[in-house]
Image (cartoon, rainbow, N blue to C red):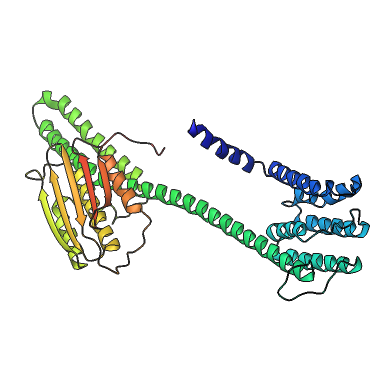
Protein backbone atom coordinates (compact mmCIF):
# COMPACT_ATOMS: atom_id res chain seq x y z
CA UNK A 1 0.00 0.00 0.00
CA UNK A 2 2.81 2.37 0.87
CA UNK A 3 4.48 1.61 -2.45
CA UNK A 4 1.39 2.83 -4.28
CA UNK A 5 1.35 6.03 -2.23
CA UNK A 6 4.98 6.69 -3.12
CA UNK A 7 4.57 5.94 -6.82
CA UNK A 8 1.51 8.12 -7.39
CA UNK A 9 3.16 11.52 -6.68
CA UNK A 10 6.11 10.64 -8.93
CA UNK A 11 3.79 9.61 -11.73
CA UNK A 12 1.81 12.82 -11.28
CA UNK A 13 5.01 14.88 -11.37
CA UNK A 14 6.15 13.21 -14.60
CA UNK A 15 2.69 13.73 -16.08
CA UNK A 16 2.72 17.44 -15.23
CA UNK A 17 6.34 17.84 -16.38
CA UNK A 18 5.29 16.71 -19.86
CA UNK A 19 2.53 19.38 -19.89
CA UNK A 20 4.18 22.72 -18.97
CA UNK A 21 1.25 24.82 -20.22
CA UNK A 22 -1.15 22.96 -17.94
CA UNK A 23 1.27 23.37 -15.05
CA UNK A 24 1.47 27.12 -15.70
CA UNK A 25 -2.32 27.37 -15.92
CA UNK A 26 -2.80 25.61 -12.58
CA UNK A 27 -0.06 27.62 -10.91
CA UNK A 28 -1.14 31.02 -12.25
CA UNK A 29 -4.83 30.26 -11.69
CA UNK A 30 -4.21 29.36 -8.06
CA UNK A 31 -2.01 32.41 -7.53
CA UNK A 32 -4.66 34.70 -9.07
CA UNK A 33 -7.47 33.29 -6.92
CA UNK A 34 -5.42 33.58 -3.73
CA UNK A 35 -4.40 37.13 -4.68
CA UNK A 36 -8.04 38.14 -5.30
CA UNK A 37 -9.23 36.74 -1.97
CA UNK A 38 -6.89 39.12 -0.15
CA UNK A 39 -8.98 42.10 -1.31
CA UNK A 40 -12.50 40.60 -1.15
CA UNK A 41 -12.77 40.85 2.64
CA UNK A 42 -11.95 44.54 2.77
CA UNK A 43 -14.39 47.09 4.13
CA UNK A 44 -15.94 48.77 2.30
CA UNK A 45 -16.25 45.99 -0.26
CA UNK A 46 -14.24 46.92 -3.37
CA UNK A 47 -15.91 47.00 -6.78
CA UNK A 48 -15.83 43.84 -8.87
CA UNK A 49 -13.84 45.49 -11.66
CA UNK A 50 -11.24 46.59 -9.11
CA UNK A 51 -10.90 43.05 -7.79
CA UNK A 52 -10.63 41.76 -11.37
CA UNK A 53 -7.97 44.36 -12.19
CA UNK A 54 -6.04 43.38 -9.09
CA UNK A 55 -6.13 39.71 -10.03
CA UNK A 56 -5.34 40.41 -13.67
CA UNK A 57 -1.81 41.49 -12.74
CA UNK A 58 -0.77 37.82 -12.53
CA UNK A 59 -2.58 36.49 -15.62
CA UNK A 60 0.23 37.41 -18.09
CA UNK A 61 2.42 34.82 -16.35
CA UNK A 62 0.57 32.16 -18.38
CA UNK A 63 2.87 33.09 -21.29
CA UNK A 64 6.06 33.53 -19.27
CA UNK A 65 7.84 30.68 -21.12
CA UNK A 66 6.99 31.69 -24.69
CA UNK A 67 6.68 35.51 -24.47
CA UNK A 68 8.62 36.66 -21.40
CA UNK A 69 9.20 40.18 -22.76
CA UNK A 70 5.50 40.72 -23.38
CA UNK A 71 4.70 39.32 -19.93
CA UNK A 72 6.88 41.88 -18.13
CA UNK A 73 5.54 44.75 -20.24
CA UNK A 74 1.94 43.67 -19.63
CA UNK A 75 2.45 43.29 -15.88
CA UNK A 76 4.11 46.70 -15.72
CA UNK A 77 1.23 48.24 -17.69
CA UNK A 78 -1.36 46.63 -15.38
CA UNK A 79 0.59 47.91 -12.38
CA UNK A 80 0.51 51.47 -13.76
CA UNK A 81 -3.19 51.15 -14.62
CA UNK A 82 -4.09 49.95 -11.13
CA UNK A 83 -2.14 52.79 -9.55
CA UNK A 84 -3.72 55.37 -11.85
CA UNK A 85 -7.34 54.20 -11.35
CA UNK A 86 -6.90 53.38 -7.63
CA UNK A 87 -9.99 51.10 -7.56
CA UNK A 88 -9.27 49.82 -4.04
CA UNK A 89 -8.44 52.69 -1.70
CA UNK A 90 -5.45 51.97 0.51
CA UNK A 91 -4.37 48.95 -1.59
CA UNK A 92 -1.01 49.62 -3.22
CA UNK A 93 0.71 46.87 -5.28
CA UNK A 94 4.09 45.90 -3.95
CA UNK A 95 7.11 44.71 -5.94
CA UNK A 96 6.45 41.02 -5.33
CA UNK A 97 4.15 40.40 -8.29
CA UNK A 98 6.44 42.28 -10.65
CA UNK A 99 9.32 40.18 -9.35
CA UNK A 100 7.71 37.18 -11.05
CA UNK A 101 7.70 39.01 -14.36
CA UNK A 102 11.32 40.09 -13.93
CA UNK A 103 12.29 36.52 -13.02
CA UNK A 104 10.49 35.19 -16.10
CA UNK A 105 12.17 37.60 -18.51
CA UNK A 106 15.62 36.97 -16.98
CA UNK A 107 15.16 33.19 -17.23
CA UNK A 108 13.55 32.88 -20.65
CA UNK A 109 15.05 35.83 -22.55
CA UNK A 110 18.69 36.70 -23.30
CA UNK A 111 20.42 39.16 -21.02
CA UNK A 112 20.62 41.71 -23.84
CA UNK A 113 16.82 41.94 -23.69
CA UNK A 114 16.11 41.21 -20.03
CA UNK A 115 18.40 43.89 -18.59
CA UNK A 116 16.88 46.85 -20.51
CA UNK A 117 13.34 45.59 -19.83
CA UNK A 118 14.06 45.22 -16.11
CA UNK A 119 15.52 48.73 -15.91
CA UNK A 120 12.57 50.09 -17.88
CA UNK A 121 10.10 48.34 -15.56
CA UNK A 122 11.90 49.68 -12.51
CA UNK A 123 11.89 53.23 -13.86
CA UNK A 124 8.21 52.97 -14.83
CA UNK A 125 7.13 51.79 -11.39
CA UNK A 126 9.22 54.46 -9.68
CA UNK A 127 7.73 57.24 -11.84
CA UNK A 128 4.24 55.85 -11.29
CA UNK A 129 4.70 55.82 -7.52
CA UNK A 130 6.02 59.40 -7.63
CA UNK A 131 3.07 60.66 -9.73
CA UNK A 132 0.47 58.91 -7.58
CA UNK A 133 1.97 60.17 -4.36
CA UNK A 134 3.18 56.79 -3.12
CA UNK A 135 6.88 57.49 -3.58
CA UNK A 136 9.03 58.03 -0.52
CA UNK A 137 12.71 58.93 -0.30
CA UNK A 138 15.07 55.95 -0.06
CA UNK A 139 16.24 55.03 3.42
CA UNK A 140 19.69 53.46 3.52
CA UNK A 141 19.61 50.02 5.12
CA UNK A 142 15.80 49.85 5.16
CA UNK A 143 13.19 48.25 2.87
CA UNK A 144 10.16 49.53 4.72
CA UNK A 145 8.04 51.36 3.94
CA UNK A 146 7.93 50.45 0.26
CA UNK A 147 10.28 52.85 -1.51
CA UNK A 148 12.50 52.96 -4.56
CA UNK A 149 15.10 51.12 -2.51
CA UNK A 150 12.64 48.25 -2.09
CA UNK A 151 11.97 48.00 -5.82
CA UNK A 152 15.66 48.17 -6.71
CA UNK A 153 16.50 45.40 -4.25
CA UNK A 154 13.72 43.01 -5.25
CA UNK A 155 14.04 43.67 -8.99
CA UNK A 156 17.78 42.98 -8.81
CA UNK A 157 17.19 39.84 -6.72
CA UNK A 158 14.53 38.52 -9.13
CA UNK A 159 16.73 39.21 -12.17
CA UNK A 160 19.76 37.50 -10.63
CA UNK A 161 17.69 34.44 -9.71
CA UNK A 162 16.17 34.22 -13.18
CA UNK A 163 19.48 34.75 -14.96
CA UNK A 164 21.17 32.17 -12.72
CA UNK A 165 18.46 29.62 -13.55
CA UNK A 166 18.85 30.43 -17.24
CA UNK A 167 22.57 29.72 -17.01
CA UNK A 168 21.91 26.46 -15.16
CA UNK A 169 19.38 25.36 -17.80
CA UNK A 170 21.77 26.30 -20.61
CA UNK A 171 24.63 24.38 -18.98
CA UNK A 172 22.39 21.36 -18.42
CA UNK A 173 21.25 21.42 -22.04
CA UNK A 174 24.81 21.75 -23.27
CA UNK A 175 25.94 18.85 -21.08
CA UNK A 176 23.01 16.78 -22.27
CA UNK A 177 23.92 17.49 -25.89
CA UNK A 178 27.56 16.63 -25.23
CA UNK A 179 26.46 13.41 -23.55
CA UNK A 180 24.32 12.50 -26.56
CA UNK A 181 27.22 13.19 -28.91
CA UNK A 182 29.63 11.24 -26.71
CA UNK A 183 27.26 8.28 -26.57
CA UNK A 184 26.85 8.32 -30.34
CA UNK A 185 30.60 8.62 -30.84
CA UNK A 186 31.25 5.74 -28.45
CA UNK A 187 28.78 3.57 -30.33
CA UNK A 188 30.46 4.43 -33.63
CA UNK A 189 33.92 3.78 -32.18
CA UNK A 190 32.80 0.49 -30.66
CA UNK A 191 31.29 -0.65 -33.96
CA UNK A 192 34.42 0.43 -35.82
CA UNK A 193 36.58 -1.43 -33.31
CA UNK A 194 34.49 -4.57 -33.84
CA UNK A 195 34.78 -4.29 -37.61
CA UNK A 196 38.52 -3.64 -37.41
CA UNK A 197 39.12 -6.59 -35.12
CA UNK A 198 36.96 -8.88 -37.24
CA UNK A 199 38.98 -7.86 -40.27
CA UNK A 200 42.15 -8.65 -38.36
CA UNK A 201 40.72 -12.02 -37.33
CA UNK A 202 39.87 -12.71 -40.98
CA UNK A 203 43.45 -11.91 -41.90
CA UNK A 204 44.73 -14.29 -39.23
CA UNK A 205 42.40 -17.04 -40.38
CA UNK A 206 43.52 -16.38 -43.94
CA UNK A 207 47.10 -17.26 -43.01
CA UNK A 208 46.01 -20.44 -41.25
CA UNK A 209 43.53 -21.62 -43.87
CA UNK A 210 45.81 -20.68 -46.76
CA UNK A 211 48.55 -22.84 -45.29
CA UNK A 212 46.32 -25.91 -45.09
CA UNK A 213 44.70 -25.39 -48.50
CA UNK A 214 48.13 -24.93 -50.08
CA UNK A 215 49.23 -28.19 -48.50
CA UNK A 216 46.14 -29.91 -49.96
CA UNK A 217 46.96 -28.53 -53.42
CA UNK A 218 50.60 -29.65 -53.21
CA UNK A 219 49.72 -33.15 -52.02
CA UNK A 220 47.01 -33.50 -54.67
CA UNK A 221 49.42 -32.52 -57.46
CA UNK A 222 52.02 -34.96 -56.15
CA UNK A 223 49.40 -37.72 -56.13
CA UNK A 224 48.27 -36.74 -59.63
CA UNK A 225 51.83 -37.04 -60.95
CA UNK A 226 52.19 -40.49 -59.38
CA UNK A 227 48.87 -41.71 -60.74
CA UNK A 228 49.50 -40.27 -64.21
CA UNK A 229 52.75 -42.22 -64.52
CA UNK A 230 51.17 -45.37 -63.10
CA UNK A 231 48.94 -48.07 -64.61
CA UNK A 232 46.45 -47.11 -67.34
CA UNK A 233 43.45 -47.74 -65.07
CA UNK A 234 44.69 -45.09 -62.70
CA UNK A 235 43.77 -42.28 -65.13
CA UNK A 236 40.34 -41.68 -63.65
CA UNK A 237 41.81 -41.44 -60.19
CA UNK A 238 44.39 -38.98 -61.50
CA UNK A 239 41.60 -36.82 -62.93
CA UNK A 240 39.86 -36.77 -59.53
CA UNK A 241 43.02 -35.83 -57.74
CA UNK A 242 43.70 -33.12 -60.31
CA UNK A 243 40.23 -31.73 -59.67
CA UNK A 244 41.07 -31.53 -55.96
CA UNK A 245 44.22 -29.56 -56.76
CA UNK A 246 42.38 -27.15 -59.07
CA UNK A 247 39.62 -26.68 -56.48
CA UNK A 248 42.22 -25.85 -53.84
CA UNK A 249 43.83 -23.32 -56.19
CA UNK A 250 40.43 -21.74 -56.88
CA UNK A 251 39.68 -21.55 -53.17
CA UNK A 252 42.99 -19.79 -52.51
CA UNK A 253 42.38 -17.32 -55.35
CA UNK A 254 38.84 -16.50 -54.19
CA UNK A 255 39.95 -16.15 -50.58
CA UNK A 256 42.72 -13.71 -51.50
CA UNK A 257 40.31 -11.75 -53.71
CA UNK A 258 37.75 -11.53 -50.90
CA UNK A 259 40.30 -10.45 -48.31
CA UNK A 260 41.69 -7.96 -50.80
CA UNK A 261 38.45 -6.02 -50.34
CA UNK A 262 39.58 -5.40 -46.76
CA UNK A 263 42.63 -3.51 -48.10
CA UNK A 264 45.27 -5.79 -46.62
CA UNK A 265 48.79 -4.92 -47.66
CA UNK A 266 51.68 -7.29 -48.08
CA UNK A 267 52.76 -6.55 -44.54
CA UNK A 268 49.30 -7.44 -43.26
CA UNK A 269 49.39 -10.81 -44.99
CA UNK A 270 52.68 -11.80 -43.38
CA UNK A 271 52.75 -15.02 -41.32
CA UNK A 272 51.08 -14.61 -37.95
CA UNK A 273 52.66 -15.53 -34.59
CA UNK A 274 51.62 -18.33 -32.23
CA UNK A 275 52.02 -19.32 -28.60
CA UNK A 276 55.69 -20.00 -29.30
CA UNK A 277 56.21 -16.25 -29.69
CA UNK A 278 54.82 -15.09 -26.31
CA UNK A 279 58.41 -14.64 -25.13
CA UNK A 280 58.66 -11.77 -27.61
CA UNK A 281 55.74 -10.05 -25.89
CA UNK A 282 57.32 -10.62 -22.50
CA UNK A 283 60.51 -9.00 -23.75
CA UNK A 284 58.65 -5.95 -25.04
CA UNK A 285 56.83 -5.49 -21.72
CA UNK A 286 60.08 -5.96 -19.79
CA UNK A 287 61.77 -3.30 -21.91
CA UNK A 288 58.97 -0.93 -20.82
CA UNK A 289 59.95 -1.53 -17.18
CA UNK A 290 57.44 -4.24 -16.26
CA UNK A 291 58.48 -7.23 -14.15
CA UNK A 292 56.93 -10.08 -16.11
CA UNK A 293 56.65 -13.73 -15.16
CA UNK A 294 55.13 -16.19 -17.62
CA UNK A 295 53.85 -19.74 -17.10
CA UNK A 296 52.90 -21.70 -20.21
CA UNK A 297 51.29 -25.12 -20.01
CA UNK A 298 50.13 -26.18 -23.46
CA UNK A 299 49.94 -29.63 -25.11
CA UNK A 300 53.21 -31.12 -26.23
CA UNK A 301 54.17 -30.06 -29.71
CA UNK A 302 51.66 -27.19 -29.65
CA UNK A 303 48.80 -29.44 -30.75
CA UNK A 304 46.33 -26.57 -30.55
CA UNK A 305 44.78 -25.23 -33.79
CA UNK A 306 46.80 -22.49 -35.45
CA UNK A 307 43.89 -20.03 -35.50
CA UNK A 308 43.37 -20.49 -31.77
CA UNK A 309 47.06 -19.81 -31.12
CA UNK A 310 46.94 -16.61 -33.13
CA UNK A 311 43.93 -15.33 -31.19
CA UNK A 312 45.54 -16.29 -27.87
CA UNK A 313 48.70 -14.42 -28.84
CA UNK A 314 46.67 -11.31 -29.72
CA UNK A 315 44.80 -11.44 -26.40
CA UNK A 316 48.07 -11.57 -24.44
CA UNK A 317 49.50 -8.80 -26.63
CA UNK A 318 46.55 -6.49 -26.05
CA UNK A 319 46.50 -7.27 -22.31
CA UNK A 320 50.18 -6.34 -21.94
CA UNK A 321 49.61 -3.19 -24.00
CA UNK A 322 46.85 -2.15 -21.60
CA UNK A 323 49.11 -2.80 -18.61
CA UNK A 324 51.82 -0.53 -20.01
CA UNK A 325 49.30 2.18 -20.91
CA UNK A 326 47.18 2.22 -17.77
CA UNK A 327 49.42 0.88 -14.98
CA UNK A 328 52.96 1.62 -16.15
CA UNK A 329 56.03 -0.37 -15.02
CA UNK A 330 54.46 -2.84 -12.56
CA UNK A 331 54.63 -6.55 -11.84
CA UNK A 332 52.79 -8.71 -14.38
CA UNK A 333 51.94 -12.42 -14.22
CA UNK A 334 50.93 -14.38 -17.32
CA UNK A 335 49.54 -17.91 -17.27
CA UNK A 336 48.61 -19.83 -20.45
CA UNK A 337 47.15 -23.28 -19.93
CA UNK A 338 45.55 -25.56 -22.45
CA UNK A 339 44.45 -29.08 -23.22
CA UNK A 340 42.84 -30.67 -26.22
CA UNK A 341 39.51 -28.91 -25.63
CA UNK A 342 40.16 -25.54 -24.03
CA UNK A 343 42.79 -22.83 -23.70
CA UNK A 344 42.77 -20.40 -20.76
CA UNK A 345 44.73 -17.17 -20.48
CA UNK A 346 45.22 -15.13 -17.32
CA UNK A 347 47.06 -11.82 -17.13
CA UNK A 348 47.32 -10.02 -13.78
CA UNK A 349 49.16 -6.84 -12.91
CA UNK A 350 49.89 -5.00 -9.68
CA UNK A 351 48.46 -1.61 -8.77
CA UNK A 352 50.11 1.37 -10.49
CA UNK A 353 52.63 3.41 -8.58
CA UNK A 354 51.30 6.46 -6.68
CA UNK A 355 51.08 9.49 -8.94
CA UNK A 356 51.04 7.42 -12.13
CA UNK A 357 48.96 9.07 -14.86
CA UNK A 358 47.40 6.46 -17.17
CA UNK A 359 47.19 7.01 -20.90
CA UNK A 360 43.52 7.59 -21.81
CA UNK A 361 41.99 4.98 -24.06
CA UNK A 362 38.78 4.44 -26.02
CA UNK A 363 38.06 0.89 -24.82
CA UNK A 364 38.76 -0.67 -28.20
CA UNK A 365 41.26 -3.12 -26.78
CA UNK A 366 38.66 -4.94 -24.69
CA UNK A 367 36.22 -4.85 -27.59
CA UNK A 368 38.79 -6.50 -29.87
CA UNK A 369 39.67 -9.14 -27.29
CA UNK A 370 36.01 -10.01 -26.77
CA UNK A 371 35.57 -10.43 -30.52
CA UNK A 372 38.54 -12.78 -30.72
CA UNK A 373 37.43 -14.82 -27.73
CA UNK A 374 33.84 -14.97 -29.00
CA UNK A 375 35.11 -16.23 -32.36
CA UNK A 376 36.23 -19.38 -30.52
CA UNK A 377 33.08 -19.76 -28.43
CA UNK A 378 34.89 -18.46 -25.37
CA UNK A 379 34.43 -16.06 -22.49
CA UNK A 380 36.41 -13.03 -21.37
CA UNK A 381 36.33 -11.42 -17.93
CA UNK A 382 38.28 -8.30 -16.98
CA UNK A 383 38.11 -6.10 -13.93
CA UNK A 384 39.98 -4.52 -11.00
CA UNK A 385 41.52 -6.52 -8.18
CA UNK A 386 41.05 -5.72 -4.47
CA UNK A 387 44.64 -4.52 -4.23
CA UNK A 388 44.14 -1.94 -6.99
CA UNK A 389 45.61 -4.03 -9.79
CA UNK A 390 43.83 -5.53 -12.78
CA UNK A 391 43.01 -9.09 -13.83
CA UNK A 392 42.03 -10.44 -17.23
CA UNK A 393 40.88 -14.01 -17.82
CA UNK A 394 39.97 -15.53 -21.17
CA UNK A 395 38.85 -19.05 -22.02
CA UNK A 396 38.77 -20.19 -25.67
CA UNK A 397 37.40 -23.42 -27.05
CA UNK A 398 39.87 -25.55 -29.00
CA UNK A 399 37.09 -27.40 -30.80
CA UNK A 400 36.74 -24.76 -33.48
CA UNK A 401 35.37 -21.27 -34.09
CA UNK A 402 31.90 -20.35 -32.95
CA UNK A 403 29.10 -19.98 -35.50
CA UNK A 404 29.03 -16.73 -37.44
CA UNK A 405 27.31 -13.87 -35.63
CA UNK A 406 25.52 -10.84 -37.00
CA UNK A 407 26.18 -7.29 -36.00
CA UNK A 408 22.86 -6.97 -34.22
The outermost residue toward the left is: 300
Going by the image, does 49 lie left or right of 223?
right
Q: Give the quarter of the image for residue 76.
A: bottom right
Going by the image, does 379 lie left or right of 360?
left
Residue 63 shows up from this direction = yes
Going by the image, does 358 lie left or right of 280?
right
Residue beneath the point at 71% across and 45% down: 27
Residue beneath the point at 70% across and 57% down: 108
Return the residue nearer the eye: 15 or 3. Answer: 3
Q: Quadrant of the C terminus?
A: top left
Residue beneath the point at 61% across and 58% down: 170
Q: Position of residue 230 (x, y in %)?
A: 8, 30
Number of numbered discs overlaid on the protein picture: 0
Return the residue nearer the eye: 31 or 336. Answer: 31
Q: Give the quarter of the image for residue 270.
A: bottom left
Residue beneath the point at 36% across and 50% down: 196
The outermost residue toward the right is: 85
Q: Position of residue 6 (x, y in %)?
A: 52, 37
Q: Give the quarter of the image for residue 375.
A: top left
The outermost residue toward the front is: 43
Image height of 234 relative to 69, above or below: above
Q: Position of residue 291 (x, y in %)?
A: 16, 64
Going by the image, does 125 lie left or right of 300?
right
The outermost residue toward the bottom is: 140
Residue 206 shows up from this direction = no
Image height of 246 relative to 112, above or below: above
Q: Position of residue 192 (x, y in %)?
A: 41, 49
Amino acid sequence: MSAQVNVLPRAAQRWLADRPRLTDALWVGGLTLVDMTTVLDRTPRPPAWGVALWGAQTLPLLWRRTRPRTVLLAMTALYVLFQALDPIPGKVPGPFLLMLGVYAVARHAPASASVPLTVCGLATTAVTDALTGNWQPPRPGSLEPITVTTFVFFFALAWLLGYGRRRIDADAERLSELNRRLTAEQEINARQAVLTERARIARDLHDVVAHHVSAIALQARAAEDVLTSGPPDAGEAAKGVGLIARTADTALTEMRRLLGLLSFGERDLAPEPSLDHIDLLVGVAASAGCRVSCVSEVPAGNALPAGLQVSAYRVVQEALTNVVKHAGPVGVRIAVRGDGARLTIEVENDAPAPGHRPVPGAGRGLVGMRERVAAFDGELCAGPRPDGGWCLRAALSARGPAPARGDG
